[in-house]
Amino acid sequence: MRGPVDAVIVGAGPYGLSLAAHLSAAGVTYRQFGMPMSLWRTAMPQGMYLKSQGFASNLADPDGMFTLAAFCAAAGRPYADYGLPVPLDTFVGYGRWFQSRAGLAVEESLVTDITRDGDRFQVTAGDCERVAARAVVVAVGVEHFAYVPEPLARLPSALCTHSSAHADLAPFRGRQVIVVGAGQSALESAALLHESGADVRVLVRERQLAWNGEPLPAGRPLPQRLREPEAGLGSGWATWFYSNHPDLYRHLPSRTRAYRARTALGPAGACWLRYRVEERFPVLTGQVVIAAKPEGNRVRLTVDAVDAVDAVDTVDTAGARGGRKELTADHVIAGTGYRPDVAALGFLDQGIRSGLRTLSRTAVVGRGYQSSVPGLYFVGPLVAPSFGPVMRFVYGARHAALAVTRALAAENGRSRAVPAMAARQ
């Protein structure tokens, strides 16, 4: 076991890499474990595009030099701040380029155990290596939190999988697939399946699909910009607040924070995806799956109208069951999102988990992203109820990286290095 470091970063996605770049500049000693951009490489299908605009898809370095625009210019790839969707392979390449240009040494092994030893943490990576650290920053993405609702969760994986299980949808060519969900992941997966030659149908609980509007022109007159400002997560004053003021968001009442983190920027398809969905394949709206069972090497779903299901506890719905129908397919893909939950982090010792204050199953953190366990920090989706919906997006990485760096630099007597970085944010 090597000597203690100031911090261990768990994860090497946009949040982990952004934090590493800031800690390095501040002189905070750290080690970082994870597979760089793993979620984007292995849990998203080929041919996918990012929903965020180009300007909102930057990883964060202290000088703001290693942007997506800079990578695209260097690699000869098309780029625009607004209006040009970012291909998945471009973003994955950008993450690797960022790591290289920032000189970040990521140790490509997974953390398997974190325990507390006095005022330090013992972090086990891979099979046996142990690292002593004064602090740990959990910067994992959503890969631990894939959500498949009942009754789909009881189906075998040969018949039903989460959308994150597929980096390539081509093997479904010629097969019947039902996609469940109304968000970007479900709708884009369905479009890619259709374009790959699958026979696809989409089941949506909502009564109609929601679509994001076109990006607002950057050169709009001031009165229009004041009525509906454009921000990293979209347009409108509420979205502007979520995008730019996570520091203020955390002062809202806890119930409000939890509700907004769960419901703001809800399921919707990107405007550029719409023409690839509408009238291309069946979309059954207002439907809910009430039963699912294997039938040989296929799957049978019983679905009913949402209105009928919602009425079960209040009226006799025998007459409403005429809307119930049976659907069969070779496979079901649940594009049903993610539900962050600290209990799903198996690498955290039970003693540590029991010491965490939580809100909606996520860690409650303070201004510097430190949890109720001293020295243990969380960034990204696991702190959306604390800092807001921006933590579900790459756009939140800069705020998290700077705040955690300030806290760790101050804790380790290196606070003089941080104000210079702050001026460049």
Image (tube, helix red, strand yellow):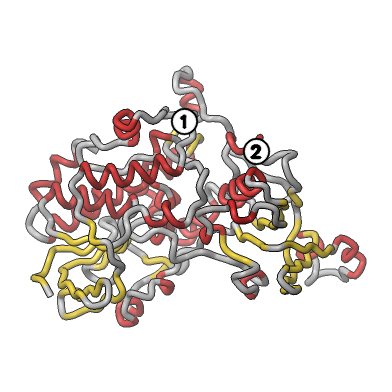
Q: Is residue 149 above or below residue 80?
A: below
Q: Is 186 displayed left or right of 58 in the figure? A: right
**Who's the residue at 10% across and 46% down the image?**
417
Task: Return the residue found at the far bottom.
Answer: 351
In the rendered image, which quarter is residue 314 located in? Answer: bottom right
Q: Amino acid at mark 1?
A: Pro
What residue lies at 25% left-to-right and 47% top-to-bottom?
A: 99
Image check: 412 left or right of 224? Answer: left
**Can you give x and y, in whole percent of width and height, for residue 386 in the image?**
39, 58
Q: Nearer the viewer, residue 382 or 59?
A: 59
Whether residue 359 appears in this view of the structure is no
Query: Which is closer to the viewer, label 2 or label 1?
Result: 2
In the rendered image, the vertical position of residue 225 relative to residue 208, given as above or below:
above
User: Quick one: label 2, few (<14), some, or many (20+) residues within 10 Å?
Assistant: some
The N terminus lies in which quarter of the figure? bottom left
Q: Secondary structure at mark 1?
A: loop
The circle on residue 280 is: none
Please name the residue that numbered disc 1 is placed on. 229
Mark 2 or mark 1: name the one nearer the start of the chain.
1
Q: At 27% across and 43% down in the image, what residue appears?
A: 98
Residue 325 in view of the camera: yes
Q: Which residue is mark 2?
A: 276
- Label 1 Cα crowd, 10 Å radius (few <14 / some 14-19 / many 20+): many
The x and y percentages for residue 229 are 46, 30
Q: Position of residue 230 (x, y in %)?
A: 46, 31
User: Do residues under tags 2 and 1 come within 8 Å of each other at their CB atoms?
Assistant: no
Q: Secondary structure at mark 2?
A: helix
Tell me the CA gap for discs 2 and 1: 28 Å
User: Which three-letter amino acid code belongs to the residue tagged 2?
Assistant: Arg
Q: Image point 88% across, 64% down: which residue?
A: 320
Q: 56 or 103, which is in the foreground?
A: 103
In which quadrant will I find the C terminus? Answer: top left
